[in-house]
Image: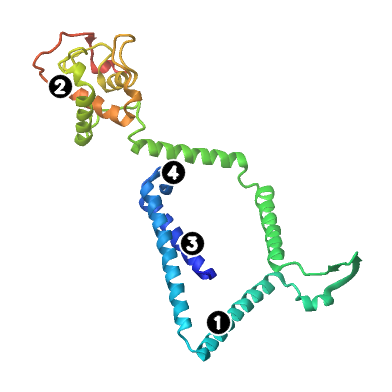
Amino acid sequence: MRTTASYLRVIALVVIAIIGTEYFTDLPKGEYAIFEKPFAALFVIMVLIVAIAIEVTVAALHKILYLSLSEDKKEAFDKAQAKKSTYFSKQVERLMQAMTKSKKIEEEHEIELDHNYDGIRELDNRLPPWWVYSFYITIIFGVIYMVRFHVFNDYDQEEEYRIEVAEAEAAIEEWKETAKDFVNAENVTMLEDEARIQNGEQIYVQNCVACHKVDGGGGIGPNLTDEYWILGGGIKNVFRTISEGGRSGKGMVAWKNNLSPAEMHEVASYVMTLQDNEPAEPKEPQGEIWKPENEE
C-alpha cells in the first residue's frame, strides 16, 4: 500500500462509512454518531482496518506476481509503468500550464526583465487566467449590484431583515403545531390520541398512585374523580399543577424536573379521564367546585 490511489481508496471508504452512519442514525442536529454512538465509531474503525487489509493484500499479490515474472517480462512491465507515470505527469503539467500560463524554466530568459537585485532576477510572468477571470467576475458582479440596489433601489438590508424574520416566525409557528414537546399551561389541550393517553396512564401508575391511588380516589393526595379542586380543574390547571407542584410546603412536588412537557401533557390528559371513575374508597372533597368556564 504505497501508491496515492491506495490511500485515496481507503480515505474514500472511510468517508462513505462515516456518511452512512450519520445518515442512518437519527440524532439531533449538532450531534454526530461517531462521537455519540460507540458502535458507529467501531463500525468506522472496522471499515478502516478492512480497507487497509484489502489494500495490503492486493499490494502483496502484485508483488508476488511481479516476482514470478521472467526478467524480460519484468522489464516490459517496468517500461509500461514508467510510461503510465510519465503520461500522468504530463497531464498534470499541462493542466498547471493552462491554469498559470507560466513559462518553463528553460524559457524564462524570454520574459526576464532588466532588473537584478543581488542576483535575484525579476520575471514578467502573465497573471494566471483563473485570477484574471475571477477579477472580471467581481467587476461584473459589482456593476450588477450597484445598478440593482443603488440605481433601481431594490430591497435594502432592513427590508431583507423583516422578510427573514417573518419567514422565521412562520416556520416557528409551523413547528409549534407539530412539536409535541412544545407545550405549556397556556397552550395545552386535552389529548384525543388513545395511545398517548395510555402512556399517561403508565406515568400515573409509576409516579402518582402512592398519593392518589390507582382509581384516583385519593390518599395522601386529593381525590381526582370528584368536581372539587384545590388549585383548579381543567387540563390547563392540572398541567400547571403537575409541572409547578402543589401548595408550597405541603403539596405535590414539581414534576417538570422529572418529566418532559410531552409526558406531563399525557399524564394530565389521563388525570382528566379519571373524572369518569367511581373509586372504591373516595377521599372527602377538598378545595372548591370547579366549572369549565372558570378555566383561564
Tell me the element at label 4. Answer: loop
> Closest to the observer: 285 or 95?
95
The circle on residue 11 is 3
Precedes in sequence: disc 3 or disc 1? 3
C-alpha separation, residue under disc 2 versus residue under disc 3: 59 Å
Foreground disc of the pair 4, 1: 1
Q: Quadrant of residue 48?
A: bottom left
* Above or below for 290 versus 46: above
**Label 4 belongs to which residue?**
31
Q: Earlier in the sequence, mark 4 or mark 3?
A: 3
Relative image position of residue 77 (x, y in whole percent) = 52, 85
Which residue lies under the disc numbered 1? 81
Look at label 2 and name its amino acid. Answer: Val
Q: CA distance from mark 4 to mark 3?
A: 22 Å
Q: Amino acid at mark 4?
A: Glu
User: The residue under label 3 is which amino acid type?
Assistant: Ile
| Residue occupied by mark 2 | 214
Give the residue type at disc 1.
Gln
